[in-house]
Amino acid sequence: MDRTPRERDARGRPRNARPRDGLGRPLPRGAAGVPRAPEGVVRTPAETIALAQRLLDDTLPFHAHEVLEDAWKSAPDAERPLWQGLAQLAVGLTHLLRGNRAGARSLLERGRERIRPYAAQPPHGLAVAGLLDWADRLLRDLDGGAVPSRDVVVPRLAG
């Protein structure tokens, strides 16, 4: 049994400080990983969207998910499902790029359903209708047996 003490953040909460690759997989300690956005940062919606989009464009959906998760945790109650759904879409893309079709399907479906109620009046310039179309296309590809590659189309968060 591993007796290594758990890593903790400045507030004493457990935190895995191991480096991670571009798809969020832990690497051995001491390996060169992809820099991560700091956790627990409260950003404006515009800052969150811009940073998450840059990370998605750089094929770093796991890291985008962490940024969107911060927004979900700090959002007003009425918007929490929206930000949670966006984070789930990013994790779904992460699973897809890792080759985990079942995990991708599950997270894409959950994320899609969480953002759907915001389609009629999307806040913060979010492209909710486009994100729903994007998730639907990926789910159809998965249903059809397509094996997505790293060339999968990156979603556009804002319209």
Image (cartoon, helix red, strand yellow):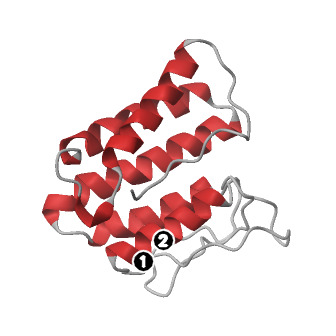
| Residue at the image point whose x is 24% and y is 52% from the top | 81
- Judged left or right of residue 108, residue 53 is right
Image height check: is 12 above or below 86?
A: below
- The image position of residue 127, as x and y in percent, is 35, 52
The C terminus - image quarter: bottom left
Image height check: is 147 above or below 120?
A: above
Question: Which residue is labeled 1 in the image?
Answer: 47
For residue 89, the mark is: none
- What SS does tag 2 mark? helix
The front one of 103 and 50 is 50
How many numbered marks are there?
Answer: 2
Q: Are marks 2 and 1 in contact (CB under 8 Å)?
A: yes
Question: Which residue is labeled 2 in the image?
Answer: 50
Q: Quadrant of residue 27?
A: bottom right
- Judged left or right of residue 116, residue 59 is right
- Looking at the picture, which amino acid does disc 2 mark? Ala
The front one of 129 and 15 is 129
- Looking at the picture, which amino acid does disc 1 mark? Glu
Image height check: is 67 above or below 144?
A: below
- Is residue 112 something that shows in the picture? yes
Structural crowding at the residue carrying mark 2, measured as other residues with C-alpha within 10 Å and reported as few (<14), some (14–19) or many (≥20): some
Image height check: is 155 above or below 45?
A: above
- The image position of residue 82, as x and y in percent, is 27, 53
